[in-house]
Amino acid sequence: MTTHAEHVDHELIQAATHIARTRCRGDNHTMAAAARSRDGRIATAVNAYHFTGGPCAELVLIGAAAAQGVYELDTNLLPESYVWADHQLDAEEAAPRSTS
């Protein structure tokens, strides 16, 4: 399988890393996410622990961005590798198996 290299937005990585280092403390907030709006603003968020699993940082980010009036994000919150890994098992199960 070949994949094409997508542009890596290092500013988003830095923003998410900064939020993770400064806001993720204890067991309630353990992950951070960042996304860019279509007008260039960066929104950040952290996950919220709940005994049922709680919302991930990406989901919280969508809500936090909407609360700031940002409804269209220019960032793919689920990179191709994540989507591919999520559906890899389905593809393997659907593939024909040789009988030899």
Image (cartoon, rainbow, N blue to C red):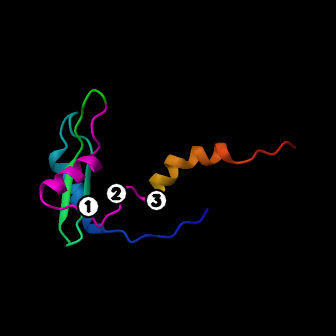
Rendered view: 84 above or below 98: below
Disc 3: CA contacts within 10 A as few (<14), some (14-19) or many (>=20): some
Q: Which residues are magenta?
A: 53-79
* Quadrant of the image occupied by residue 75: bottom left
The quadrant of the picture occupied by the C terminus is top right
Q: Which mark is residue 77?
A: 2
- State the CA–CA distance, disc 3 to disc 2: 10 Å
Q: Which is more N-terminal, label 1 or label 2?
A: 1
* Quadrant of the image occupied by residue 67: bottom left
Residue under the image location 53 percent in, 48 percent down:
87
Amino acid of disc 2:
Leu
> Which residue position holds label 3?
80
Please tell me whether mark 3 sits on a helix, a strand or a loop: helix
Residue under the image location 19 percent in, 59 percent down:
43
> Which residue position holds label 1?
35
The quadrant of the picture occupied by the N terminus is bottom right
